[in-house]
Amino acid sequence: MSYAAKLVYNTHDWVTPSRDVHDGVGIHVNIGQNGYNFGMEEWLNRPLLRERNLGYLDCYRSAAHPGVADIVRLFTFHDGTVYHIGSLYGVSQLADGEIAGIRNELNQANWLGEINRDFVPLGDLRPILQHIEYQHIWTRNAIVAARGEGFMLNIEYKKLEMFERNQWRNLTAIDPQVNIKWKKISRRYRVNAALNNLHWFYT
């Protein structure tokens, strides 16, 4: 079965947060004049996580998805346009009981040390151990949860394919209905019945 999932927009190729997440999505950080938002999927393309075939999709936070999804097409929304930016293959939802082991493995790999300065370009100078919003999701022990209350990873996969920016596919130009039908970041979409003009997208 083929699905589609939305990622927050990111200008750092989903390796590190880029302060492009709008209000009402992701996790809000109340710091500075206006604060900022970040999404856990902004590290999806981080080498340390790719090596372990681990990641985060918000639609796997909002609901249980048993079994393995053959393909999850990844799309993002920017300036009124929906872009296909990559795909995940062999995707399954993590279980609550796996969290402690994953967190221990990432601790051994110095994950917190690696991302210690990731928020500095966003105007947040706190070291990661004092970043209470990130520490909150780091210490959660649930996969399916309210926004901001689940663990910072929720999927494992067989393969991640991310396109170069000049290879992003403009889905809005192919079928403008995608802007209406695929709006929610918290929903996993079945693409084989979603739109009329994206037949290439289904297989």
Image (cartoon, rainbow, N blue to C red):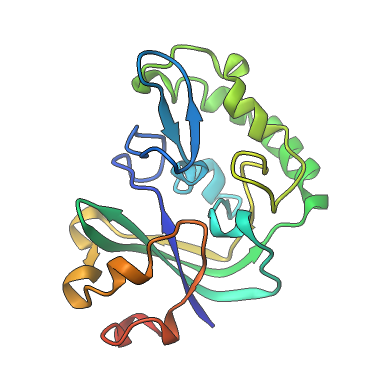
Residue 86 coordinates in the image, percent (x, y): 37, 63
Q: Is residue 195 left or right of residue 97?
A: left
Residue 20 coordinates in the image, percent (x, y): 32, 37
Residue displayed at 70% across by 51% down: 143
What count of labels does the image hold? 0
Residue 146 coordinates in the image, percent (x, y): 65, 46
Residue 183 coordinates in the image, percent (x, y): 38, 61
Residue 25 occupies quadrant: top left
Residue 137 occupies quadrant: top right
Depicted 118 relative to depicted 170: above or below = above
Q: Nearer the viewer, residue 4 or 103?
A: 4
Q: Is residue 120 left or right of residue 11?
A: right
Q: Nearer the viewer, residue 22 or 136?
A: 22
Depicted 88 relative to depicted 103: above or below = below
Q: Which quadrant: the N terminus?
A: bottom right
Depicted 29 relative to depicted 20: above or below = above
Residue displayed at 47% across by 20% down: 30
Q: Which quadrant: the C terminus?
A: bottom left
- Residue extending farthest right: 97
Residue displayed at 50% across by 12% down: 126
